[in-house]
Amino acid sequence: MKPRDASEQLRARELWRPSVETALALLAFPRAVSALVSPIADCDETFNYWEPLHYLLYGFGFQTWEYSPVYALRSYAYLLAHYGTAKVLSVALTLRLFPLDKLLLFYGLRASLGLLCAYAEAQFYYSTSKCFGRRTARYLLCLLLVNAGIFHASTALLPSSFTMVLIMLFTSAWMDKRYYRALGYGIVAVLCGWPYVGVLFVPFTVETLYARGWTKSILAGVAIGGAVLALELLVNHYYYRRWVLPAWNILVYNVLSNETDSTLYGTEALSYYVMNLALNFNVVAILAVPVALFVFMLPMDCEAGRMQLLAYLSPMYIWLMIMFSQAHKEERFLSPVYPLICLAAATTLSAVVCRIGRLFSHASSVGRVLSHLFVVGTLGIFSVLSVSRVVSNVLNFGAPLRVYQHLYAQVLLNPETSVLVEGTTAATFTENLCIMKEWYRFPTSFFIPTNRTKVQFVKSSFAGLLPKPFEEHENGTSIIPSAMNDRNREEASRYVSIEVCDYVVDLNLPNQKEVKLWEEPAKWELVHSEPFLDTERSKSPYRSFYIPMLTPQHVHYVDYAIYKRKQAAANRETSTSV
């Protein structure tokens, strides 16, 4: 080893690093904030995960075609883990110490997701410090703390977010040479999370076969895989009442079948992911891409060490290449490798600092100043843009959560808040809450106090397949629902006439094709509204990033509103006097 390399390694080992406990405490704060304020960005999260979970807990909720026993594309094993968490949280709520119990349970579940993510991030950071060095780990911790993409993904009830957490735990175990633990995380990610991520574990599999030998590796894989597979099959058999493996079914539907594929739900150009990375990672994305070159600038004992680091980073390249090549693109599809993108950027940043130190080895004070300016400038720009992005998302798209929270607490029939219909017909009184074009921003039935409020759909410009309620039956998950299909064909039976609606939630767009309730004051009364970004009339970058003083001048907001049919109040008074 060259003396210069030895001295660099010595200085790197002497760098201060936060303990894993300190890292966890730091990371828990933004995850808790995310749980409280982060909008639900994807209707898939609502209807494929929050709604079935709500059904398991309360006996009512929406069902998508993926949960039909005919198709069985979604795993109840994934939901069951969160069901257990919800039951633990609900113990405190059953004491009736707090109002708005269901809302507290919803936010408590999100907080538990955030805490799990923070734990995985802390382990990921600490293993990085031992493998990539303390400097790289410190930069990684900074990038994880303020990253806009991870801020939103950390508390999302989605397999992609679950997989992101498992990949951090997997990579941490891999770095620590705990091969069987890493193998377990990988198998759970594939069978219970997202089967497509199996490709991310190919480099690890090759190394494990070499390091542990074929016999031990295969026996361990069969044992762990068999246990997870058995659990997956048993749980899904209990709910579907048939033997199914959702991980296989979804792989067949989206990849192996010649008749169906994910493009039924939209396609995007290559620029979609480029823009996504620019918005959520800004300068970090630029630093992450060339890491395969910069990793060789790190002070290491031998070339094999650098190749090992490349192996840890290689899943990022594998995933990005696959995702960029797919026609159907969604923001959440990249989230499994968000932490690896941060690690890649931190590695590049550390390598540049090392290179600057070498270039100015004869003028060390100059090198230190330049390194400091480069690091502070890079992390500063990243932090400002990331916080600006988070604030923009919360301010611009947080209205649905606030509107439905107002509905829950102040408007809908609710025994928790004494919003009740009294009289002899109270037990059977129901009300219809209708949604038109804003169906995909419905935040979940956790914001609906009881099943005496029926959420209904009114026909809008959308022409695809909407979800329908689960059967309110003890074996409702195994009942084959009518009017379902796997081709995204519209089913007219989903709709009701607006004449039967007691309340309507809608976004008041000036050029919308749907009925404009604000223009019918004789029929509809405005109950409550919150500002929501009008993207068509707002300019970039002000709509994507919050810039104090400038953003309010360049963006436009419209009302995300609750309307009550004026006859509804009279009908309610009549029913209470019977």
Image: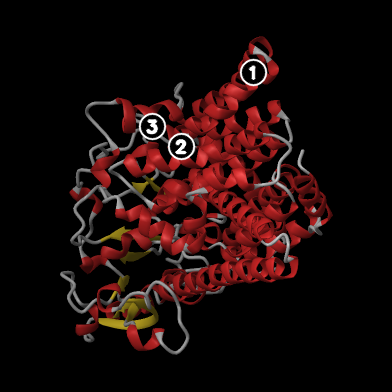
Image position, residue 421 (x, y; %): 46, 72
Q: Nearer the viewer, residue 154 or 73?
A: 154
Question: Which sits earlier in the primary sequence, circle 3 or circle 1?
Answer: 1
Which residue is denoted by mark 1 in the rendering? 210
The extreme top residue here reads 215
Q: 531 or 175, which lies in front?
A: 175
Badge 3 crowding class, 10 Å Cα cut-off, few under 14, some 14 to 19, many 20 or more, is: many
Residue type, mark 2 in image? Ile
Residue 387 x/y as whole percent: 54, 72
Res. 59 in view: no
User: Which residue is labeled 2 in the image?
Assistant: 318
On the image, the x and y values in percent for residue 572 come to: 37, 75
Which residue: 34% across, 58% down?
Answer: 440
Label 3 element class: helix
Pick whichever of labels 2 and 1 is earlier in the sequence. 1
Q: Residue at x 46, y 37 (%)?
A: 318
Mark 2 element type:
helix
Query: In the image, what residue type sits under mark 3?
Result: Ile
Q: Do residues under tags 3 and 2 come within 8 Å of each other at their CB atoms?
A: no
Residue 489 spot, x, y in % from top left: 20, 43
Residue occupied by mark 3: 250
> Seen in the image, is 60 located left or right of residue 125?
left
Asked if residue 531 lies left or right of residue 449, the reply is left
Spatial CA distance of label 2 from label 1 is: 21 Å
Which residue is more in the foreground, 351 or 434? 351
Q: Residues within 10 Å of mark 1 (few under 14, many from 20)?
A: few
| Real-space Cα separation, disc 3 to disc 1, in angstroms | 32 Å
* Among the 4 quarters of the image, the one containing residue 70: top left
User: Mark 3 or 1, which is nearer the eye?
Assistant: 1
The disc label shown at residue 576, or none: none
Q: Is residue 135 left or right of residue 509?
A: right
Cα separation, mark 3 vs mark 2, equals 21 Å
